[in-house]
Image (tube, rainbow, N blue to C red):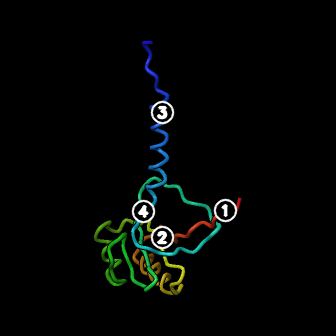
């Protein structure tokens, strides 16, 4: 037989694709936060957004680096300039006061960043 059988190769590649698709979102942000659940649709964009996290104790993180609220805007401007088109996602623990999350979002919006959004967990679907 002089042909190459590619079926096992395709099967292995599909399994690897599924494994990477499942594990990639789990590796994006490492600060543990219990997100509130929502019925809203998910966003599908190609560029990587910045993630600002407010944990259960009210501490603020830019991606995975802890920062305080006074330095957050200065850090954003220093790293990304005054680019108002950069996407910034704010994650807040479901047990944190709503005012603290809105305080963080207000500081970011007041600095001129226009694309600021809240992240939430989708509810588990019952089949």
Q: Earlier in the sequence, mark 3 or mark 4?
A: 3
- x, y (%) of residue 101? 49, 81
Q: CA distance from mark 2 to mark 1?
A: 27 Å
Q: CA distance from mark 3 to mark 4?
A: 32 Å
Where 3 sits versus 75, above or below? above
Q: Residue at x 42, y 81 (%)?
A: 107
List the single residue furthest toward the front: 1
Q: In screen coordinates, is 66 left or right of 56?
A: left
Q: Residues within 10 Å of mark 3 (few under 14, many from 20)?
A: few
The N terminus: image quadrant: top left
Q: Which residue is mark 2?
A: 116
Closer to us: mark 2 or mark 4? 4
Q: Earlier in the sequence, mark 1 or mark 4?
A: 4
Q: CA distance from mark 3 to mark 2?
A: 40 Å
Asked if the residues shown at circle 3 and circle 4 are in contact, with their CB atoms under 8 angstroms apart, the answer is no
Q: Which residue is mark 3?
A: 10
Q: Image quadrant of residue 70?
A: bottom left
Where 5 sits versus 93, above or below? above
| Label drawn at residue 125 | 1
Q: Which residue is mark 4?
A: 49
Q: Image quadrant of residue 112?
A: bottom left
Q: Residue at x 48, y 42 (%)?
A: 15
| Label drawn at residue 5 | none
List the single residue furthest toward the top: 1
């Amino acid at each position: 037989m002089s042909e190459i059988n590619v079926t096992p190769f395709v099967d292995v590649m599909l399994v690897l694709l599924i494994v990477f698709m499942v594990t990639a979102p789990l590796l994006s942000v490492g600060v543990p936060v219990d997100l509130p659940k929502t019925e809203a649709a998910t966003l599908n964009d190609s560029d990587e957004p910045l993630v600002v996290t407010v944990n259960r104790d009210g501490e603020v993180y830019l991606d995975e680096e802890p920062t305080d609220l006074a330095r957050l805007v200065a850090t954003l401007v220093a790293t990304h300039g005054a680019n108002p088109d950069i996407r910034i996602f704010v994650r807040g623990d479901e047990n944190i006061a709503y005012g603290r999350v809105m305080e963080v979002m207000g500081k970011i919006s007041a600095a001129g960043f226009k694309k600021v959004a809240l992240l939430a967990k989708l509810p588990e679907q019952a089949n």
